[in-house]
Image: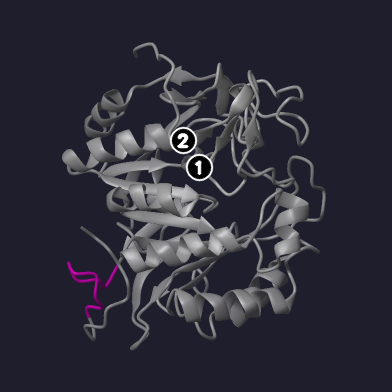
Amino acid sequence: MSEVSSTEALYYIKRENNTVFCQLCPQGCRIGQGEVGRCGVRRNENGKLIALSHSRITSVALDPIEKKPLYHFHPATEILSVGAFGCSFRCLFCQNHEISQGGKPWGDEPSERVTPRPPMQTIRPRELITLALRYNSFGISYTYNEPFIWFEYLLECSKLARQNNLKNVLVSNGYINPEPLSELIPFMDAINIDIKSMDDSFYERLCGAHLKPVLNTCIALKKAGVHLEVTNLIVTGENDSERNFIDLRDWIYENLGDDTPTHLSAYFPHYKFNAPQTPLETVRKAFDIVSEKLPFTYMGNVWRSGQGSDTLCRKCKTILVKRLGYSVKVLALTEQGNCVNCGTPNNFILH
């Protein structure tokens, strides 16, 4: 693979004394000379903001699309998945902290010491497209760490992917400002957004962020016709109340529609957080509450088949897709993604 050169970042404002203000995400970092933003991937070099992660890959694999998780988008297929390093959040329970926190300041200020970056390789955008085609992948999934902070690379790759009839898939925390999001949306096919809690204090305490921008991103994606699925990681003692599940359900129902696939995932202790793993009964309770209004509700990080794993037709209850982990069988979908038995649309995209 080729070597990478410095790439100037998009969406920033130059100020006096070589200071810059990043405008990519709601963190709005003020970055001094030689410093990096909270994400760890955007550095001020002599008054120019440089995208450090452009073409830099820490993880690449051919994954089941269900791993994203996306259950209603090309089910039972595999997709080339890539990730870089850094993240706009500082989740204390991060499952991929080795790459998400790499390159980031240890404290809240950009001037503080920086966490070492993980090992990586260079893959230019055209090389990534070639790789996807070589593996007969139907698209590219930008995942593992936060893809929105990979903005310049993501934009370039997604345009090339479209030109080569490849789908673009994101797995994201949803933290991006409206203007850069609007530039990306025309090239996005499917996104899973993690709504971590309906309580803003959860975001502040455990993630170093805020809830409202995430919700705004979800609404913008839905309005634009991008296939959207939502994940809620249930962290024991933090966002596992009935009120959180009710508020999440009602917000999705009212703002995104009752056909929005919603994944309720069990948490396991990781990184800096040691709360007990999510009990199965808590995930079941969440499922019972959310599925009252959202028929495509699923239980994640729970090895089971049947209820909470399979997709049933919202009208006649025919099993459309059967799942056990990543073993997936499409049983009763037409080529248009409708129920074979009654013809009802069930928000599937197959082509």
Depth check, front residue: 244 or 43: 43
Of the 4 image quadrants, the one containing the N terminus is top left
Residue 160 place in picture, x, y as percent: 23, 35
Image quadrant holding the C terminus, namely: bottom left
User: Which quadrant holds residue 16?
Assistant: top right
What stretch of residues is rendered in magenta? Answer: 331-340
Going 31% across and 34% down the picture, which residue do you hit? Answer: 156
**Label 1: how many Cα within 10 Å (few below 14, some 14–19, many 20+):** many
**Position of 108 relative to 202 (above/below):** above
Residue marked by disc 1: 24
Q: Are marks 1 and 2 in contact (CB under 8 Å)?
A: no
Q: Nearer the viewer, mark 1 or mark 2?
A: 1
How far from the left and from the top, in percent, is residue 62?
38, 37
Q: According to the image, label 2 marks what residue?
A: 150
Residue 194 falls left or right of residue 89:
left
Q: Nearer the viewer, residue 116 or 320?
A: 116
Judged from the image, the secondary structure of the residue bearing numbered disc 1 is loop
**Which amino acid, mark 2?**
Trp
Q: How many marks?
A: 2
**Which residue type does callout 1 highlight?**
Leu
- Tell me: residue 291, above or below residue 175: below
Q: Residue 254: tell me if it is visible.
A: yes
Residue at the spot x=30%, y=67% of the render? Answer: 348
